[in-house]
Amino acid sequence: MIELLTADTPNGKKISIMLEEIKFDYKITKINIFKDEQFKPEFKKLSPFSKIPVIIDYDNKISLFESGAILIYLGEKSGKFYDKNQRTIINQWLMGQISYVGPMLGQHHQFHHYNPGKSEFGEKRYFKISERIYKELEERLSQSKFLAGNNYTIADIATFPWIARHKWHDIGLKNFKNLKKWYEVISERKAVQIGYDLLKNGDKIPKA
Ligand SMILES: N[C@@H](CCC(=O)N[C@@H](CS)C(=O)NCC(=O)O)C(=O)O
């Protein structure tokens, strides 16, 4: 049994999608990051940076923080979506998501979606960077079916919930033919639809 301590955000959804994909038994414990529950000492013991997601694996008696590390762990444990022979390339796209795609789109959410009108500089800067990310992903997906090659991997699982916020981005996913196709293919997976609705409140994947 795995316990997933999380909130309903793109980083949180990565792990519920993975747990659905690998069909592991899991339960969700909600951490309300808008009420500062991430700073409670018992949570901070598990997550030193006070961030979701975290998992506790009761079989192996360990806990893990950082979504990339969690995806790698679950990929190794299940033997799925993290092919031993493809790890060098999967790791690159996974690290690129964790260090660049997520943080930059996250800033774009802050300036463009949550706080428009507060900082022209911030809005322009992160809009431009987000457009660049769309172009870079489009370029990659014009040469490769999935981010790390022919197969769907944890790198796609990490990236998908961020692109699912495309309406907030206002960049126009439909203008990026290959990125849109990739998004639609992943959206059709049953496990992704279930995992996306992390809190079971009927959250549907936005259409491209
Ligand atoms: N690099 C981390 C980022 C996790 C992250 O940014 N989590 C956010 C929610 S999406 C959070 O917990 N924010 C609360 C806070 O920073 O206080 C990962 O990939 O797990």
Image (spheres, rainbow, N blue to C red):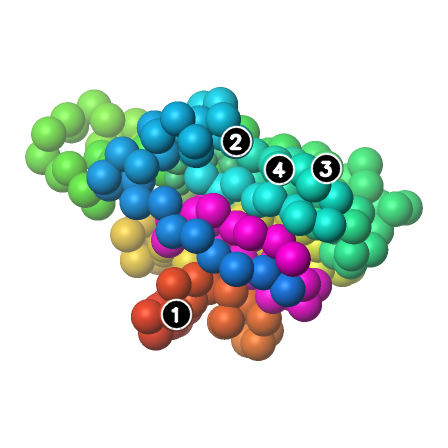
Callout 4–callout 2 Cβ contact below 8 Å: yes
In reply to whether residue 5 is colored magenta, the answer given is yes
**Real-space CA distance between mark 1 and mark 4, rounded to the nearest whole angstrom:** 24 Å
Type of amino acid under label 2: Leu
- Residue at the right extreme of this rendering: 85
Picture residue at 9% right of the left edge, 35% below the top:
117
Type of amino acid under label 4: Ser
**Real-space CA distance between mark 1 and mark 2, rounded to the nearest whole angstrom:** 25 Å
Q: Earlier in the sequence, mark 3 or mark 2?
A: 2
**Real-space CA distance between mark 3 and mark 1, rounded to the nearest whole angstrom:** 30 Å
Q: Sort mark 1 into few (<14), some (14-19) or many (20+) by Cα contacts within 10 Å.
A: few
Q: Which mark is residue 63?
A: 4
> Is residue 194 found left or right of 139 in the rendered image?
left
The secondary element bearing badge 3 is classed as: helix
x%, y% of residue 170? 28, 52
The secondary element bearing badge 2 is classed as: loop
Q: Mark 3 near ligand 1 (CB under 8 Å)? A: no
Q: Which mark is residue 33?
A: none
User: In the rendered structure, which segment of residues is drawn in magenta?
Assistant: 1-24
Residue at the spot of label 3: 91
Picture residue at 57% right of the left edge, 76% below the top:
190
Callout 3–callout 4 Cβ contact below 8 Å: no
Picture residue at 55% right of the left edge, 52% below the top:
3
Q: Earlier in the sequence, mark 3 or mark 4?
A: 4
Q: Which mark is residue 46?
A: 2
Q: Is residue 192 visible?
A: yes
The secondary element bearing badge 4 is classed as: strand
- Image quarter where the N terminus lies is bottom right
For marks 3 and 4, give the one nearer the viewer.
4
Q: Sort mark 4 into few (<14), some (14-19) or many (20+) by Cα contacts within 10 Å.
A: some
